[in-house]
Image (cartoon, helix red, strand yellow):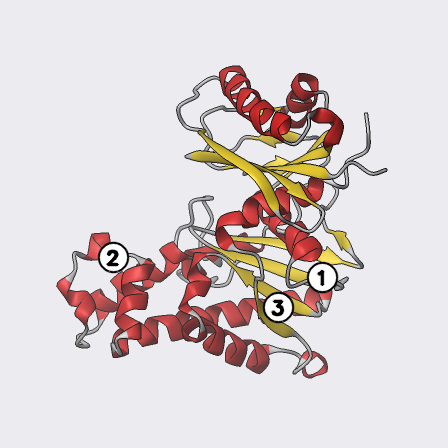
Amino acid sequence: MEKPYAIGIDIGGTNTVFGVVDKRGQIIEQGTIKTGKHSEVNAYMDDLVKNLQIIIDKVGGTANIKGVGVGAPNGNFFTGCIEFAPNLPWKGVIPLAQMLTDRLGIPASLTNDANAAAIGEMTYGAARGMKDFIVITLGTGVGSGIVVNGQLVYGHDGFAGELGHTTIRRQNGRLCGCGKHGCLETYASATGVARTAREYLETTKDASVLRNLDPKEITSKDVFDAAQSGDALAKKIFEETGSILGEAFADFISFSSPEAIILFGGLTKAGNLIFDPVRKSMEENLLPIFRNKVKLLHSELKESDAAVLGASALGWEVKDL
């Protein structure tokens, strides 16, 4: 009889969240530890394993766990390593999957956080039954997971699918944290929306409630709240953001001809303020052979659980030791 549970672990720069998940996608037990307080990776692993063992014991011990899946920044599926992640306290190459397997005696697998979201969507969410789709995560940055013929696309080195760092503006593009100019995430992420707001406030004289705020402190939520209250400038910011995102999606569709593009993350809370201009721009920029074929969907995963669910879906796929 197949073991009834998998473990999902989401490693973020501030917190690590983990849970025991059943086959239906229900989180049975969960917990969290602070990632950032551990400057040394072995101390972090000791704390993580200690807390994992508590929830493993609650579901009958390791004999009931099929595998462990981990989503992490710069996580490489092929090597099981976190490689040079800028927002984590440990530098260089960290063989995290092997470290977990050695300590827990359970097979572990690792990928990056956006790929974990795609696996979660395919297993538990909006992409169930689909073989070709793209998940776009719209948060502080823009992440992506690409599935073709039912398989996640990893590329030859494990790092395929960095659609947030495709260049959407080649002339005078914004500087990105990656060092390039004009990356999609500098326009279409939550931080990109805030940057657009600051630019509009500097270069126009349009009336807006956003002018009552310190420009350096403006967030995408401030822009959303203003747009919801009918502020014309804030609505214009979302229209431009959605238009740029739709342009990029038209290019992505030409590459892999997905059945759907599924949007996930904080920026999707803007609802039709972002979805409508994305859909309009995407259709306008598509090759005729792709028009009116690709669904634009909202993630069906609960945001607070999605990272753990996505990682746990990877846990079902690992091979026994």
Q: Position of residue 207 (x, y in %)?
A: 17, 76
* Type of the residue with mark 1: Arg
Q: Is residue 13 left or right of residue 204?
A: right
The image quarter containing residue 195 is: bottom left
Asked whether 205 or 60 is in front, the reply is: 60
Determine which residue is flagged by label 2: 218
* Type of the residue with mark 2: Ile
The local crowd at label 3, few if under 14, some if 14 to 19, many if 20 or more residues have their Cα within 10 Å, is some
Reading the chain from its start, which is encountered first: label 3 or label 1? Answer: 1
The local crowd at label 2, few if under 14, some if 14 to 19, many if 20 or more residues have their Cα within 10 Å, is some
Task: Give SS at disc 3.
Answer: helix
* Type of the residue with mark 3: Asp
Q: Position of residue 28 (x, y in %)?
A: 60, 41
The local crowd at label 1, few if under 14, some if 14 to 19, many if 20 or more residues have their Cα within 10 Å, is few
Between the C-alphas of marks 3 and 1, the distance is 24 Å
- Asked if the residue at tag 1 contacts the one at tag 2, i.e. Cβ–Cβ closer than 8 Å, the answer is no
Between the C-alphas of marks 2 and 1, the distance is 37 Å
Reading the chain from its start, which is encountered first: label 2 or label 1? Answer: 1
Asked whether 81 or 99 is in front, the reply is: 99
Asked whether 197 or 318 is in front, the reply is: 318
Task: Give SS at disc 2.
Answer: loop
- Asked if the residue at tag 2 contacts the one at tag 3, i.e. Cβ–Cβ closer than 8 Å, the answer is no
Q: Against 44, is 128 above or below? A: below
Q: Residue furthest left?
A: 212
Q: Position of residue 251 (x, y in %)?
A: 62, 68
Q: Against 108, is 10 above or below? A: below
Residue at (73%, 31%) from the top-left corner?
64
Determine which residue is flagged by label 3: 251
Task: Give SS at disc 1.
Answer: loop
Q: Is residue 223 left or right of residue 141?
A: left
Determine which residue is flagged by label 1: 128
